Image: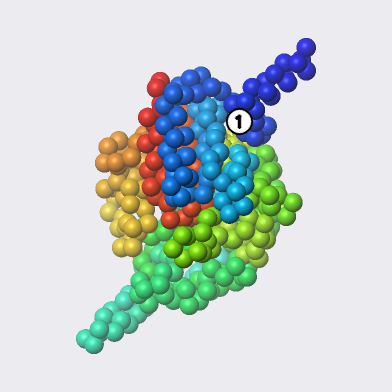
Amino acid sequence: MRVVRVFAVAMIAVLAGVAPVLAQGLPAAKPEEVGLSGERLKRLSAAMKAGVDKGEIPGAVVVVGRNGKVGYIEAFGFRDRDAKAAMKPDAIFRIASMTKPVVSLAVMMLAEEGKLSIAHPVSLYLPAFKDLQVGVEKKGSDGSVEVVREPARRAMTVQDLLRHTSGLTYGAAGRGPLKQAYIDAKVMDPGQSNEEMVAKLAKLALVHQPGTTWEYSMSTDVLGRLVEVVSGMPLDRFIAERITRPLKMPDTGFSADAAKQDRAALPQKDPASGQAPPIPPVTADLKWKSGGGGMVSTAADYARFCQFWLNGGQLDGVRLLSRKTVELMTADHLPPGTAIGADMWPAFQALLPSPEMGQGFGLGFAVRTEAGRNPLHGSAGDYFWGGAYGTYFWIDPKEKLFAILMMQAPASRLPYRYLMREMVYQAVVN
């Protein structure tokens, strides 16, 4: 009798398109059972299918969970448009900066073990960051720009790295000599180690005084090296042994096994140039284990990760963080008057962690601080982040909800993040 009942449950899951998530321990439910409208979710499905048909995205996987259950999971379009291979729910994606919350979790686990304090200077753990200098660009009468260095007014702390107020940046061509220096130093070389990356960064001038400005940066890459030094383990091994294995996220890591190549989600070619975006293959085992953007995952794995946060730091009896640490991480850590880097608006717009958008930044995520101000749906207290290749997620504790968008479409990432917010919340009915 028990065998028949288990088989029936499995068949229902397959018919609902949620078998991959159910197999990894998150129960499936009809949308109405979790306060979502199945009829209204068809609008989300139609919008995603239209994006595929218009050539805006090659394909995607979308998951919505609420009240501890998965109420919606659907795959759209192509895993590989050129090969006409259909997208499937178990597709593996490069998640870029959705790596950051994983590495931030690793840091806070070590803090809970008393192996570091986020209030301490980074240089206590990474001596190369002692006596950092800040670069100031000064324009000469002939129009030339000179970089003048001045001492940092205070030390960069681990908290600064977690909330992106470290003074570090990402290299950006044409944005002045300070940011160009990051490109010239090849600080994102896939052939380097995290130790070599830190040695390069420590020689460069900061673009802001520590603690003064939110500037999206290589801060979480530095945290990846911090995890290695404090734990005595390579970053990929620490994450595998201490996070993804305990949380039963088998397809999440810094690369996928070669045997999983037929599950790899690929970007599509730009019709104008005929070139695909330069996204590393999910099976590429790069030497640089980038704490800021090096991981791969699936919608099902990341759904477990989101539910872990909603549960206050535990999942299926495995606790990695205390509830109070989760509360600390998902609070706004940007002090009043924190400036926003001058180049930040184009990349983030309505998702910018600024007071104007009713948002701030915690320890690894952006957080919504108040109702109103932001043009997108959400709740005060929700937290979120996305990856440059197109992936996105958010967690809404007030609604006990999470949503995940997995796609490899860099040029379409902002419009589809907006779409996700609008289409998911319009389906919340009670």
Of residues 411 and 316, which is closer to you in this image? 411
As drawn, which residue projects farthest toward the top? 1
Give me the residue at 68% from left, 43% from top: 250
Note whether residue 387 is visible.
no
Quarter of the picture holding the N terminus: top right
Residue in view at x 48 percent, y 77 percent: 184
Q: Position of residue 8 (x, y in %)?
A: 70, 18
Q: Is residue 390 left or right of residue 356?
A: right
Q: Which residue is disc 1 drawn over?
A: 18
Q: Tell me: residue 283, above or below residue 45.
A: below
In the displayed orientation, state which residue is furthest to the left: 141
Q: Judge left or right: residue 143 versus residue 238.
A: left
Q: Is residue 323 left or right of residue 333?
A: right
Q: Residues within 10 Å of mark 1 (few under 14, many from 20)?
A: many
Picture coordinates of residue 70 (x, y %)?
55, 29
Q: Residue at x 39, y 41 (%)?
A: 419
Q: Quadrant of residue 139?
A: bottom left
Give how far across and how far down residue 262 sits, in percent.
Answer: 68, 49
Up/down of 130 relative to 258, above or below: below
Image x and y of residue 141, in percent: 21, 86
Q: Please state, as top left, top right, bottom left or bottom right, where the C terminus lies in the image.
A: top left
Is residue 18 positioned above or below 188 on the image?
A: above
SS of the residue under disc 1: loop
Q: Judge whether residue 272 can be spotted in this image.
A: yes
Residue at (59, 43) in percent of width and height? 87
* Image mark count: 1
The residue lying toward the viewer, choosing from 213 and 60, is 60
Q: Amino acid at mark 1?
A: Val
Q: Eyeballing the image, is 112 above or below 281?
A: above
